[in-house]
Image (tube, grey):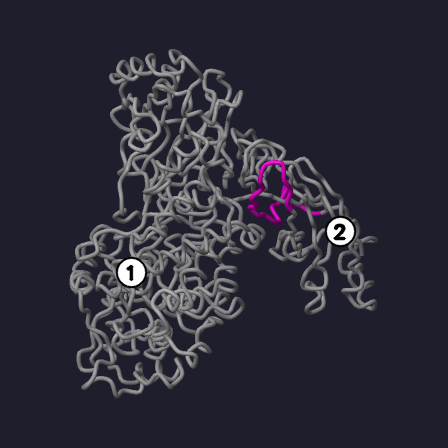
């Protein structure tokens, strides 16, 4: 059976759940008078005891029926069906069956695609987006149109620029990806902060003081909604060459696993307290990710994961059907369950678990363990606490969806994430009073359908770039130039050239949409699609003034021609800016907002497509002509560097305080010094292994670096400070440089603010060695902020 057939089979099971989520008065467990007296309904008991009680009351067939994303009802216990699969990547989306817009609520706030919000480098913004999406999720749940468990965020590192889903991620840097994941998950799941907001909005009836002790989530407390860190792990290929995500074997070194692929997941679990982890389709070093017991148990045992583990959709099926890792479907189910998978998106476990038990492949006790994890999360969500319309979030409803505050937040995210890449001779901002006519050209200029990117639901409002520019210049003309983004024909160039000739200023919108990059589709080229380059050049040749080039899409494009062409005065990347993207772009073009976004990924030249997308190595290898990947290891030419982003004003830095020397010898007992030298077989230590440091010694190593940031230009603006470290090259695989701190600050014209980074050498000045162990290189580390450089000597 192929994957399409599997998905069609699964859809048959989804039908009842879709009907359930569209019910304005959904059924709930523990409903009095007949079903409220079970121990699992008793809120005075612990979550664990309630979950144990529930599992103990189920028959084996009932247990197995819970192992699908569409969990079956248990009528005799008053438990209705439950749909685990809802989506909320950058707003509620109906990609999965858990969310439906076919009811009294027909839309939800569409925030910018994740790659755009990431370009803001603003942790507070990320948290607030997660929180706003959660409020809308709870409101839709109350209306019977959504579930409580959501499969976001996507925290895979954007390793290869061709990846169709790179747009869904926070970019290529493990630290940025990690911190985005933590902030989004906290904003999405946390109860206490949002409870305080709801109390102030609705009054004091939404909770009481006795409940507050349960609100601070230490990993197993109450949840507003459940977030899921995906896709675990080393997943970043859809379809490329002969490779597909369903059967791809990601061969990853221990070094790359430790300091690139795993940190976002470790942070999402340890610091974000995520309540769900999704294992990916691909294999990792020969073993399907959903059968990697060592990795899944590391998450639980070492990282402290308390939640449920789901497979990606039909990823348990691919263990046997696509990857041929097992000899039967029963073995695939058994391997996944024993590895730690609790639920299968799809019906594979429901169909094959009984047979696996009958054949002795898996035990009922192992099924019980999975159910305990599942029910514990549902209990933390309050699913068994009675009528949700009488609970903490009872007053949330349609008025809390598409609210003015949420749309303003979406607008602010788009403003902060848009990146100015080129601005020769200060072409931008345009002066409203000096622009009598405007032309906007390009297939995306008047098309809103794909401006949200993947996993976009039904936006509150739909306004195109063209529509929003009309608010600034009434005499604005539009021509598509190309019939679509693929731009296979030049037949529309004539009309575009004609309106360009007659306009004061010309904006050309070029780049990508979801026909070029999406789930299950990687790119093969980094150039603009089809004849788009010819369109841009044709317009630039006839425009009265230099052209403004606006680029859409999540993945990098090679626009070297535009970067070097003086007829193209400005380049602005808007990515997939969401439902308010048109307004944000117009505000930036006309100077109502000063751009401050920075690229969260390297923009490579077209020649990078010669590198095999299937090569998972991060580090460069000159012996085989391999240039490496991402700004940390890439040694080849770049169109735009990671962190590139211009402003309409100018910022200067000064270092106010930073240490010049850090002694590490006191962290290790004197008696162990000689032993360390002998272990390394050297006369002088080149690095310290973190495993050798005393417990809590990392905390004593922390130090502060203080900077001043001055705005020496004429316009107020926000600026992203990016502090890098360059390590001494004392072992193989040291990064070219590594981001160790970032902060977005707002500085008024002619004013100065101070900023401070807290540096933890164990985290920020360490690197993985070739066996995947974290080490701190000894010697001179350069701390780099813009053009400033400060030397710090780590000595032993």
User: Mark 2 highlights which residue?
Assistant: 778
Q: Image quadrant for the C terminus?
A: bottom right
Mark 1 or mark 2: whose residue is earlier in sequence:
1
Q: Position of residue 136 (x, y in %)?
A: 31, 58
**Residue drawn at (49%, 16%), measured in percent from left and top?**
566
Res 361 seen here? no
Residue in front for this viewpoint, 395 or 50: 395
Q: In this view, does 786 lie above or below 144?
A: above
Instruction: Specify few, some or many for label 2: CA neighbours under 10 Å numbering under 14, 14-19, or 20 or more.
Output: many
Which residues, given as a range, are shown in magenta? 731-753
Q: Is residue 744 magenta?
A: yes
Residue at position x 34%, y 16% from top? 503
User: In the figure, is residue 618 to the left or right of 102?
Assistant: right
Q: Nearer the viewer, residue 462 or 644?
A: 462
From the viewer's perspective, is residue 631 above or below residue 182? above
Query: Helix, strand or loop at disc 2?
Result: loop
Q: Distance between the residues labelled 1 and 2?
A: 48 Å
Q: Position of residue 763 (x, y in %)?
A: 63, 56
Callout in the foreground (1, 2): 1
In the rendered view, tell whether residue 598 sits above or below residue 568.
below
Location of mark 1 (residue): 85
């Amino acid at each position: 059976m192929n994957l399409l057939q599997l998905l069609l089979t699964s859809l048959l099971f989804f039908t009842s759940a879709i009907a359930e989520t569209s019910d304005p008065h959904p059924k709930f467990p523990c409903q009095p008078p007949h079903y409220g007296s079970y121990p699992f309904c008793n809120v005075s008991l612990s979550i664990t005891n309630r979950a144990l009680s529930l599992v103990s009351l189920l028959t084996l067939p009932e247990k197995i029926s819970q192992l699908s994303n569409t969990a079956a009802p248990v009528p005799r216990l008053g438990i209705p069906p439950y749909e685990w699969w809802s989506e909320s990547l950058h707003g509620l989306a109906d990609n999965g069956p858990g969310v439906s817009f076919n009811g009294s609520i027909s839309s939800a706030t569409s925030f910018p695609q994740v790659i755009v919000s990431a370009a803001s480098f603003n942790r507070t913004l990320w948290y607030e987006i997660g929180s706003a999406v959660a409020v809308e999720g709870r409101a839709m749940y109350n209306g019977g149109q959504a579930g409580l468990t959501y499969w976001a965020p996507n925290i895979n590192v954007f390793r290869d620029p061709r990846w169709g889903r790179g747009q869904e991620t926070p970019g290529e840097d493990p630290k940025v990806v990690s911190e985005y994941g933590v902030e989004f998950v906290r904003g999405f799941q946390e109860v206490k902060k949002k409870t305080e907001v709801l109390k102030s909005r609705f009054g004091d009836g939404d909770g009481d003081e006795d409940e507050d002790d349960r609100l601070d989530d230490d990993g197993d407390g109450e949840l507003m909604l459940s977030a899921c860190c995906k896709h675990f792990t080393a997943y970043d290929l859809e379809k490329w060459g002969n490779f597909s995500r369903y059967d791809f074997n990601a061969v990853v070194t221990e070094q790359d696993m430790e300091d690139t692929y795993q940190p976002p997941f470790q942070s999402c679990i340890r610091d974000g307290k995520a309540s769900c982890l999704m294992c990916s389709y691909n294999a990792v070093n020969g073993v399907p990710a959903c059968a990697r017991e060592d990795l899944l148990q590391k998450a639980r045992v070492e990282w402290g994961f308390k939640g449920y583990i789901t497979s990606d959709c039909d990823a348990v099926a691919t263990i046997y059907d696509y990857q041929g890792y097992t000899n039967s479907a029963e073995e695939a189910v058994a391997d996944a369950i024993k590895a730690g998978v609790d639920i299968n998106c799809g019906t594979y476990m429901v169909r094959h678990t009984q047979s696996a038990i009958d054949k002795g492949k898996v035990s009922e006790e192992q099924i019980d363990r999975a159910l305990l994890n599942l029910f514990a999360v549902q209990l933390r969500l309050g699913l068994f606490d009675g009528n949700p319309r009488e609970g903490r979030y009872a007053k949330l409803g349609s008025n809390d969806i598409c609210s003015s505050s949420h749309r303003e937040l979406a607008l602010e995210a788009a403003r902060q994430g848009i990146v100015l890449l080129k601005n020769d001779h200060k072409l931008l901002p345009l002066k409203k009073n000096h622009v009598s006519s405007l032309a906007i050209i390009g297939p995306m200029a008047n098309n809103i359908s794909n401006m949200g990117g993947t996993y976009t639901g039904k936006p509150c409002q739909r306004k195109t770039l063209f529509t929003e520019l009309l608010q600034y210049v009434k005499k604005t003309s539009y021509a598509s130039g190309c019939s679509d983004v693929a731009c296979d024909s030049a037949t529309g160039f004539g009309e575009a050239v004609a309106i360009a000739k007659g306009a004061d200023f010309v904006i050309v919108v070029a780049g990508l949409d979801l026909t070029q990059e999406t789930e299950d589709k990687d790119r093969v080229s980094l150039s603009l699609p089809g004849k788009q380059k010819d369109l841009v050049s044709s317009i630039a040749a006839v425009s009265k003034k230099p052209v403004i080039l606006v680029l859409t899409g999540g993945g990098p494009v090679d626009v070297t021609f535009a970067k070097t062409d003086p007829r193209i005065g400005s380049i602005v990347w808007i990515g997939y800016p969401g439902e308010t993207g048109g307004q944000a772009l117009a505000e930036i073009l006309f100077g109502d907002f000063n751009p401050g976004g920075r690229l969260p990924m390297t923009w490579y030249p077209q020649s990078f497509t010669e590198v095999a997308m299937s090569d998972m190595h991060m580090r460069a290898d000159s012996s085989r002509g391999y240039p490496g990947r991402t700004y940390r290891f890439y040694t080849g030419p770049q169109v735009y560097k990671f962190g590139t982003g211009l402003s309409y004003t100018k910022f200067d830095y000064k270092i106010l305080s930073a240490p010049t020397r850090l002694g590490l010898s006191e962290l290790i007992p004197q008696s162990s010094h000689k032993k360390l030298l002998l272990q390394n077989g050297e006369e002088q230590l080149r690095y310290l292994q973190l495993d050798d440091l005393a417990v809590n010694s990392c905390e004593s190593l922390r130090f502060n670096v203080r900077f001043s940031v001055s705005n020496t230009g004429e316009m107020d603006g926000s600026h992203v400070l990016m502090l890098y470290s360059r390590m001494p090259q004392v072992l193989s695989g040291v990064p070219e440089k590594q981001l160790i701190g970032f902060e977005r600050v707002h500085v008024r014209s002619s004013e100065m603010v101070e900023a401070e980074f807290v540096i933890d050498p164990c985290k920020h000045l360490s690197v993985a060695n070739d066996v995947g162990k974290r080490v701190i290189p000894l010697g001179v580390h350069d701390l780099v902020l813009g053009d400033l450089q400060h030397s710090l000597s780590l000595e032993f």
